[in-house]
Amino acid sequence: MSALPPLPGFSNPVDNAQAVFRALLTAFSHPGLPVSITLPPFSIPAGKFSSGMLALALALCDKDTPLWLDAAADTPETRRHLRFHCGAPFTAEPAEASFAFISRPEGMPRLREFNPGLAEYPDRSATLVISAELPPSQTPALELTGPGVKGNNLGVWQPAHVSGLPTWFWEDWAANSAAYPLGVDVVFADKNARGPVIRLLGLPRTSRVRLEEFPCM
Amino acid sequence: MMPQATYETGKRLAGRNAVSYNFAYLDEQTKRMIRRSILKAVAIPGYQAPFGGREMPMPYGWGTGGIQVSAAILGREDILKVIDQGSDDTTNAVSIRAFFARVAGVRTTTATAEADIIQTRHRIPEQPLREGQIMVYQVPIPEPLRRMEPSETETRAMHALEEYGAMHVKLYEDIARHGDIATSFDYPVLVNKRYVMSPSPLPKFDNPKMDQCPALQLFGAGREKRIYAIPPYTSVRSLDFEDYPFTAQHWDKPCAICGATDSYLDEIITDDAGTRMFVCSDTDYCGRRAAEKRSAP
């Protein structure tokens, strides 16, 4: 156990948490469109937690939200930081998590292992924060549609650029969409965003996805 | 004289009589809880997400749900507009605007186009909303099926099973009794083809504005402790029948002040003899049009 005092959290907890929340609200309101914000510098503990993942944890997690960390993200320094600043309990079971933080998506559990909520209370489902590549605009892209996509009623698809996910991910996502209103919601945090600049891309359960590479999907 | 208040987070004024609220009144743990409910509500359009409603410094029925939603989303740079039945200058609107100017120090406006967040009781502004704006509705009774089914357990099950027959029977009974769907406000809608939702007591005139609206719409019910949402660009269909399609109200006369023919009109009795006039309920829209008319040659 380190005897050093814990690293500080946000430099301005009230305004920074509000800014991160609004960025995520915008990301969920406009799925597929990356949302960038710049926060004042804040400390990031040693480990695989990116600044975006940490900002979301500091803004949204507390004693009411059990957290699940993937093996890569789960370092003693990260745990200590989250325990001190969020007061959140940790769980070893993906199914028990309110928020799951995944820094190495290649090895993540299948989506069905997370809590999809209850038929009467679909809001009691997990939110997955996944560290992924959000390249500016290269192929391969995927396209998505649903609420939040302008023209979704006219058959318009929104291109989105996310890579670094396991091969089964979009197959699982199709199953997640099919279970609507049950299902998990995903936010991708750019793993290449450095320091206090964070980039998020929202994928709420209402978004249906097709991949350009596989036109049959 | 009232003590001068300061709302700088984390700082307490050393001076005498200094008052300090957290930014936007609510504590941070409460805001996080409300924010998580809002995010889930956006992910499940039209679904009523429960939240731990707090006591607010005003009675239930005065917009405590809308105020908690606004307090959870407000940032220092946001510009806030508050309307009550379309009007910026009624008691409810004035006091909520003053509340946030005081506890959050945010700028307020009456101009629809300038506002980032519009908290509303029972109207949607006439001027079309734009992307990036957030509407916050004050909701008295969030459950559209409540009049047909008093039990919350039952209505939860009805929503889970998509069992909305009772609502159609109610609309059918309207037709059988009145020859027409007589519901003229709080007219139920189907959101994203899945959840039947109460649009709060909006006149049905405003229902079509919710469909594919570019702005995010959030609904807060303080007494019932529910939050629900319509994300931007979402399908919102007023329930109806093929042979009795949904129709909005319309008026034979234009607004007596600005001459608008496309707005929702309020009836105003002007004397004891029953003389009446019809004027726009949206005071910002009406005032702007009247000013343009005056300045036109």
Image (cartoon, coloured by chain):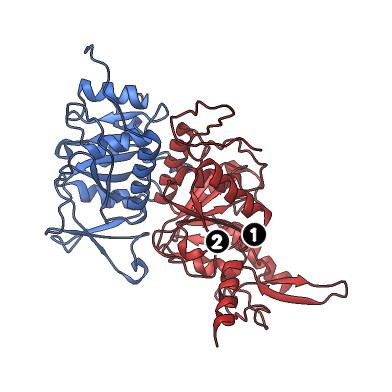
* Residue A94 percent across, percent down from the top left: 29, 31
On screen, residue B240 versus residue A204, left or right, reads right
The earlier-in-sequence mark between 2 and 1 is 1
Q: Position of residue A62 (x, y in %)?
A: 39, 29
Residue nearest the viewer, comparing B60 with B185 = B60
Q: Considering only vertical position in the picture, is B64 above or below B269? A: above
The chain containing the residue under callout 2 comes to B
Mark 2 residue type: Thr
Query: How many labels sit on residues?
Result: 2
What's the residue at 56%, 58% (across, down)?
B199
**How would you rate the neighbour count of disc 2 (Cα within 10 Å): few for under 14, some for 14-19, many for 20 or more?**
many
Residue A214 visible in the snapshot: yes
Q: Mark 2 points at which residue?
A: B110
Q: Residue at x 32, y 51 (%)?
A: A27
Q: Do the residues labelled 2 and 1 touch (CB within 8 Å)?
A: yes
Q: Distance between the residues labelled 2 and 1?
A: 9 Å
**Chain B's shade in the image?**
red
Under tag 2, what secondary structure?
loop
Tell me, for residue B89, which label it has, or none.
Answer: 1
Q: Kindly indicate which chain is depicted in blue in the rendered structure.
A: A
